[in-house]
Image (cartoon, grey):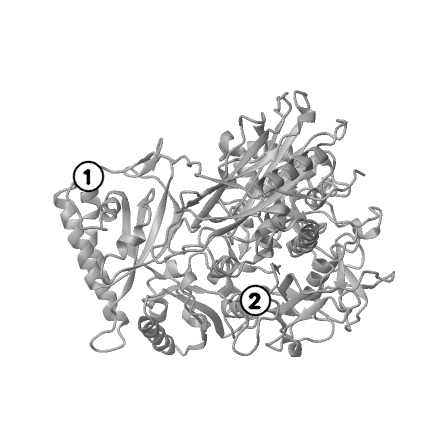
Amino acid sequence: MADKKPLLIFPKPGVAAREPRPSGRSDIHLPDYERQKERIGRRWQTLKDSFEKEAVSLSLKPEGFFTEYIVVFEIADSIDEFYKAIAKIPGMFFLKELLEEFDPDDDFYKGEHKSYPGRIFVSMVNKKSIDEIIRLWDIFDKDRDAAFDSGLAKFKDLFKKLNKVRHYSVEDRLADTGMPQYLEEIREMGQEKVRFEVEFAYPASQERRDRAFEEFQALIAEVGGEIISASKVDLRAIRYFACLADAPISVFEELTNQTNVRFLKASHVLYFRPPGQAKVSKESNETIELDTEFKADEPFGDPLVAVFDGLPLENHELLQGRIIVDDPDEFASKYIAGSRIHGTAVASTICHGDLNGEKQSLVRPIYARPLMHYNGFGHEEFPQDRLLIDLLHSAIVRMVKGNHQVPALAKRVKVVNLSLGDSFRPFRKEMSSWAKLLDWAAYEFNLLFIVSAGNFGEQIEFTIDPAEFKNPISEEGKKSFLDQMLRQDFNRKILSPAESINSLTVGALNKDAAEIDPNHAMFFARIDLTAEHGYLAPYSRFGWGMNGAVKPDILMPGGRAFLRRRPGDRSEDHVNLMFEPGGYKEPPGILVASPGSSGEINHVSHQFGTTFSAAQTTHLAGNLMEILLQLNQESSIDQQIDESFFPVLVKALIAHGADLGESYSLFRELIHEFPSVDPKQIRARTAAYTGYGEVNAPRVLYCTAHRVTLIGVGKLFWEDKENAHEFKFPLPVSVSSQVIPKTLVTTLAWFTPCNVWSNKYRIAHLYLSNFKNNEDLTMEEGMYDFRKTSKGTLQHQVYSGDRADTFIEDGFLIVKVNCRKDASDSEIKAWRRINYGLAVTLEIPESVEVDIYEEIKTAIQTQVRAKQ
């Protein structure tokens, strides 16, 4: 094994002006002026009349109370910052903006009559604001070139691009919420009442929010329903205003705008949703006793890592002294012996990793805050009498800031593991409140949330000759299964809150460190449908994220899951496959601590799921922070990295080790055959399934003589003239003019403030300059699409080349970090500067007999002395 050498730290960067980003051009066909007047003109008065009619039907008082309602604008293409124009109209305020793909018609289309991208603007209006819009339309109707009042010019763009304008319907309030499926589950269980979450529009004033709440309370009481819990979180940053309510299941029979149930049409309601939920079953948790004595140093110091999950078994032999449990809600009183399964398994994985693997236990305890309790019916779940956002917000603030009852309990925590997801909220196009809260908290409290992508547990229909479905399955069969899995992408979207743009989202590889005997009887019916120790796990969900950002970000081993044919399946041209629940005595799987059926404290079990790929990532994060602390001890004061940069630097470093490796060519080959994928988009599409690929931990933990990693940090702001930083990476003269393979890896990570009104959402956009064909080192882009990697808050690029470059002594590769504003927010007076973390690696083959590490280290030391 190559000698392990410590990571190197960049000297402080120089300042510069940012490199401009190219702007795109629209090729969407719009109707001409006369046609648009014909299409839209009469709709404004029709809209006004229909709302006034509905106002009477919803009125709770003889004189009527209906003063505000929600309107939907469907437009082709986009109108930047339209919410600013809406703010100029009295009585009108913006609610949200959504991306949409519209079917073409004779008036609106892209290219040769293809579907076109557009936006949906949703706003609250009243009679006065509708009258003002009609006034503006009348001006446009008479003269398309007429000037509008200051700040209202964007309404002219609206009139040109508007496809439809309509009122917000019951169907809108249920779209992509999971509510219909949830209601069906309630009916199947025979329950007469249903509990659900109501998310309201967020009026600017408290008085208007109070009135909206009171109106809804009166409307739901009409059908025998009631409000159970109102949100205690008034969080303007994410515009969250909600409550939990109960109502008879019978009132949900008609889920269209034709319903006579008035609360379903309540004017201030944005959504009806199932309560935030992440049930974890304990039905089949087989455990075995630890066969050897576990040995690891006693933990010490303040926690740097936290886990929000179920309640762990804190006196388990693998966890004693290693977790600090904070249970202010007294969820422990609702657990029984043997039911603390999920929290114990996750805490074990964070502390030790896969117990079958090479152990490098965390040297510090972890802070554990339970968010779930045992429900008495075989599941751990979130409390059903409290809004999830309230619970999570309270947990975060209590940990890092404290409240009027207690001081901050773990204010040094930098990384939080969240291996939970809402099965009713696959990410389609709109950010969930859960994801918005994590994005806000990441920036506000400087926390890296490591989130699981979510598990897919539904039946899988695999087209194969049933006679061929047996162990060992052929390589062609494995390839066919992966192909069919990738084509199911719409049904496998990541689960909320995995779309969080500031979080590190982790998908799973069908991989673990266990050894198995393929001749064991248990494998006669359980089939391994992926290549040995590789490929995307059949239970892992995939992306995209917000605005096409790479999600999941990375893949980590989540345990091998074998599938079996559903009992009684008699299909002749395919097999119907099912997952068995995790929790086995025998491998494969991630080996974790687990309570025995009677609460034994020395048992373990084998598990699989993205739960454990995320927890293994958090384990790596904990070890990385110890390396950074050690680097600080060994560095001069000028070279030390302040702990406030640890969250973004750890985020960058983990992704820095990601690579698709040998799987890349297979994924490209399969995706190339997808009929809907343009050949130019294959690289971009690959990232939707794999993110940046599997993380190779040794690549980010240390350097070698042939692989050198430099890390750097900084703060940038978009409005400064000096809104870019330049780092100098020394080029090793020892390989100058040699024709040898060279790999350059660059990774940049940051947390952004977010504007929930804007579909751009991300306010701070940091980006690296493209190294393709740079003047210092001849490199070509590898497996990642440069534009796609710039969509989120984590940019990762791998370049390669083997040309002979002549490096001048004291020459450097300039690594430029740029900062620009993406979405704006008129309410933001002054955001603080944006922290970022940077990692850059240069690697050459081990067969080349030079030591580039010592050469680059010496050059870095020279830079540092020159700056002193």
Residue type beneath disc 1? Tyr
x 38%, y 39%: residue? 115
Can you tell which of label 2 and label 1 is closer to the viewer?
2
Q: Residue furthest left?
A: 142
Give whichever of 252, 64 is nearer the camera.
Answer: 64
Give whichever of 503, 528 is nearer the camera.
Answer: 503
Residue 538 at what x, y percent from top left?
65, 47
Q: Residue furthest right?
A: 292
Instruction: Indicate left or right for 335 with 815 as reference.
Output: right
Tell me which numbered mark, 2 or 1, is placed earlier along the sequence.
Answer: 1
Q: Secondary structure at mark 1?
A: helix
Residue 685 at what x, y percent from top left?
53, 38
Q: Secondary structure at mark 2?
A: helix
Residue 19 at what x, y percent from top left?
44, 36
Q: Is residue 235 above or below residue 577?
A: below
Instruction: Indicate left or right for 145 with 787 as reference.
Output: left
Asked whether the viewer can see residue 652, the reply is yes
x 69%, y 39%: residue? 478
Q: Which mark is residue 33?
A: 1
Q: Are marks 2 and 1 in contact (CB under 8 Å)?
A: no
Q: Quadrant of the C terminus?
A: top right
Asked whether the viewer can see residue 582, the reply is no
Give whichever of 355, 467 is nearer the camera.
Answer: 355
Task: Judge the density around disc 2: few (<14), some (14-19), many (≥20) Cα neighbours within 10 Å.
Answer: some
Rounded to the nearest angstrom, the CA distance separating label 2 from label 1 is 56 Å
Q: Which mark is residue 403?
A: none
Q: Write down the residue under mark 2.
A: 400
Task: Judge the density around disc 1: few (<14), some (14-19), many (≥20) Cα neighbours within 10 Å.
Answer: some
x 70%, y 63%: residue? 347
Residue type beneath disc 2? Val
Residue 175 quadrant: bottom left
Q: Is residue 199 above or below residue 355?
A: below
